[in-house]
Image (tube, rainbow, N blue to C red):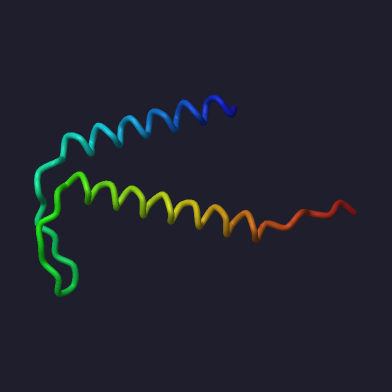
Amino acid sequence: MKSIKLVLLLVLVVALAAVVLQNQAPWQVRFLWLNGEVPGIILLFFIAAAGFIAGLTVALLVKRDAKPQQID
């Protein structure tokens, strides 16, 4: 099971790298009152990092709240 997760993670990393490397052109970004141009590679990196951090946070919170069940 551990090797399946590792292979799946590797496939996702390679797919993310392919998407990032193919989108290097500058993108117009608007956030609230801020406007600007950001290279796509940087924007995709920050979005992927934010998604990873959000997923890790949720996983840790769910794991922490899980209580062992007692068998009576």
Viewer-nearest residue: 45 or 61: 45
Left or right of residue 26, residue 7 in this image: right
Decide: is 62 above or below 8: below
Residue 47, given in percent of the width and then of the height, sits at 30, 52
Decide: is 31 above or below 69: below
Left or right of residue 59, residue 70 in this image: right
> Residue at horizontal 41%, vertical 49%?
52
Residue 19, given in percent of the width and then of the height, sits at 23, 36
> Residue at horizontal 46%, vertical 52%?
55
Left or right of residue 48, residue 38 in this image: left
Residue 45, given in percent of the width and then of the height, sits at 28, 47
Q: Quadrant of residue 16?
A: top left
- Please identify the residue farthest to the right as the structure is shown: 72
> Residue at horizontal 17%, vertical 47%?
40
Left or right of residue 64, residue 67 in this image: right
Quarter of the image with the N terminus in it:
top right
Quarter of the image with the C terminus in it:
bottom right
Viewer-nearest residue: 42 or 11: 42
Decide: is 44 above or below 4: below
Q: How many numbered marks does the figure carry?
A: 0
